Image: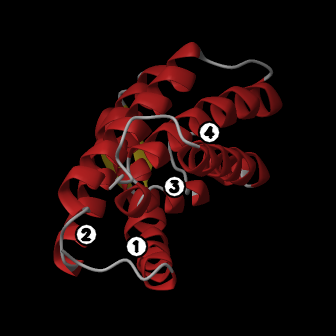
């Protein structure tokens, strides 16, 4: 019996990777004004929890989609893409998806939600850290009258968007897809 996490190339796995890569890239570029900079809501990140259902092919697709999206978004918004953003975002997505799949693939709803929390932590720490470098390592940000250290402010900005995209929208999407495909808890 073949499982979704087999690393063999099959038509099904290639289709999963391709569809998710395309969806991710299109969503990031469509919502580009909200998808970039230190304070972001990346709607496409709602697709990340689907790796819990679809496994490693989803992790590959969402990583490739992120590379394409960050390259295209960099060209569209900033006139050039950053190698740090293209590779850093892809690595963050792959790690987040792979870890979530390991944690949530055979779990109940609590483990699956915990897997999305891990995704949020991974994306927030990796992306928040390199974005701070890309925006010139500001010493501090004044947010609503509160002076925050630059790195903390950028990480917080990414965290808020990630919680909304991954833990709220993404978890609901993952559960809906799971029910639609009749995937059972094991």
Residue in the picture at 80% in, 21% down:
79
Secondary element at tag 3:
helix
Contact (Cβ within 8 Å) of mark 2 with mark 1: yes
Name the residue nearer the viewer: 43 or 141: 43
In the picture, which quadrant includes the C terminus? bottom left
Residue in the picture at 51% in, 35% down:
9
Residue in the picture at 39% in, 53% down:
4
What is the quadrant of residue 175 in the picture? bottom left
Between the C-alphas of marks 2 and 3, the distance is 16 Å
Judging by the rendered image, the residue that carries numbered circle 1 is 171
Which of discs 2 and 3 lies nearer the camera? The answer is 2
Judging by the rendered image, the residue that carries numbered circle 3 is 45
Between the C-alphas of marks 3 and 1, the distance is 11 Å
Residue 24, given in percent of the width and then of the height, sits at 64, 49
Q: Residues within 10 Å of mark 3 (few under 14, many from 20)?
A: many
Residue 112 appears left or right of 183: left
Residue in the picture at 43% in, 40% down:
93
The tag earlier along the polypeptide, 4 or 1, is 4
Judging by the rendered image, the residue that carries numbered circle 2 is 112
Residue 75, above or below 59: above
Secondary element at tag 4:
helix
Secondary element at tag 2:
helix
Residue 179, above or below 143: below
The tag earlier along the polypeptide, 2 or 4, is 4
Judging by the rendered image, the residue that carries numbered circle 4 is 65
The tag earlier along the polypeptide, 4 or 3, is 3
Between the C-alphas of marks 4 and 3, the distance is 11 Å
Residue 157, given in percent of the width and then of the height, sits at 43, 51
In the picture, which quadrant includes the N terminus? bottom left
The tag earlier along the polypeptide, 2 or 3, is 3
């Amino acid at each position: 019996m073949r499982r979704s996490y087999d690393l063999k190339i099959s038509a099904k796995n290639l289709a999963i990777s391709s569809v998710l890569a395309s969806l991710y890239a299109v969503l990031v570029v469509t919502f580009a004004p909200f998808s970039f900079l230190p304070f972001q809501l990346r709607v496409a990140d709602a697709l990340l929890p689907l790796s819990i259902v679809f496994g490693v092919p989803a992790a590959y697709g969402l990583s490739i989609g992120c590379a394409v999206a960050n390259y295209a978004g960099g060209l569209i918004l900033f006139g050039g893409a950053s190698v740090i953003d293209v590779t850093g975002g892809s690595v963050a997505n792959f790690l987040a998806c792979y870890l979530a799949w390991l944690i949530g693939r055979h779990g109940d709803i609590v483990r699956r939600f915990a897997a999305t929390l891990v995704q949020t932590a991974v994306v927030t720490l990796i992306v928040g850290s390199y974005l701070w470098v890309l925006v010139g390592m500001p010493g501090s940000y004044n947010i609503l009258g509160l002076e925050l250290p630059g790195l903390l402010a950028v990480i917080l900005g990414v965290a808020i968007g990630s919680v909304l995209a991954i833990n709220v929208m993404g978890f609901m999407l993952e559960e809906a897809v799971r029910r639609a495909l009749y995937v059972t808890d094991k």
